[in-house]
Image (tube, helix red, strand yellow):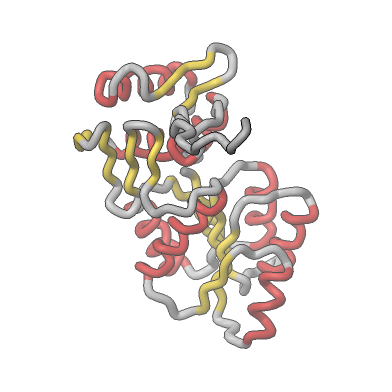
Amino acid sequence: MRVLVVEDEPRIAQDIAAALAAAGAVVDIVGDGEEAWFKGDTEDYALVVLDLGLPHLDGLAVLKRWRRNGRHMPVLVLTARGTWAERVEGIDAGADDYLPKPFQMEELVARFRALIRRSAGIGAAVIEAGPLTVDPREMRVSVGGVPVALSPLEYRLVAYLALQKGRVVPAHELIGQLYGDDDAREANALEALVMRLRRKLGADIIETRRGFGYLVADPKPPDTSLPEAGS
């Protein structure tokens, strides 16, 4: 999935980007508030990591603009401002989580995974959809309990579809989440990627809905409850 890191300290931004990339994200970096507002308002991100102390436009103002414009992506706020009142202000402005500086990179990555799951309505740490299991912490995929070796790009596709299980995901949305600004984005490349995954996972894990997109089904367990008396 695609993540926007908004941080004006280049070293910190690169460290965050490297940690999130290692966790399976495609990361864009911007260093000032005006550019951050534009990117977040015009691109679809699965998550934004937002520093509040930004040049040109304060991070809190950026966040408020996004929310006013109906941008609902999860936002993890980073800031050196440590008082509880400032944290409340950030959350009231629309932040989904808050991490004061300095922080451990492992905690940031854990919060990233939790926010991504929460935004998809998934509470469990491991995502299951029928025989498919995706473990975001270990970045492992298995089918019927059998581990499947995937490339980073293949993993990103399966993980995103698993997070969206039960929903048909349009091709343009998948392409936007799989590739960064500098990568080629072509529907033919996505189709070829899905074909490779079907050979590895099995033909039935990823369904194609012609003209609509791709789906990982969310089979519901059978209803084993006993009928009420008199019914």
Tell me if residue 159 comes above or below residue 201 in the rendering.
Answer: below
167 or 26: which is nearer to us?
167
Image x and y of residue 67, in percent: 74, 56
Can you say whether 80 is above or below 67 in the image? below
Tell me if 74 is positioned left or right of 113 in this view.
Answer: right
Describe residue 105's horizontal placement relative to residue 170 as left or right: left
Name the residue located 67 percent from the left edge and 72 percent from the top edge. 90
What residue occupies the far right of the structure in this picture? 68
Residue at point 33%, 39% (across, down): 133
Q: Considering the image in quadrants, where does the C terminus appear?
A: top right
Residue 72 x/y as whole percent: 67, 50
Q: Position of residue 125 (x, y in %)?
A: 39, 54
* Nearer the observer, 143 or 65: 143
**How many numbered badges does the structure rendering display?**
0
**Quadrant in the rendering for residue 37:** bottom right
Can residue 149 be seen? no
Q: Quadrant of residue 59?
A: bottom right
Residue drawn at (35%, 67%) of the image: 106
* Left-right relation of 6 to 190: right
Q: Is residue 13 above or below residue 132?
A: below
Which percent across, then down, holds residue 215?
48, 25
**Quadrant of residue 140 within the rendered picture:** top left
The residue sitting at the bottom extreme is 83
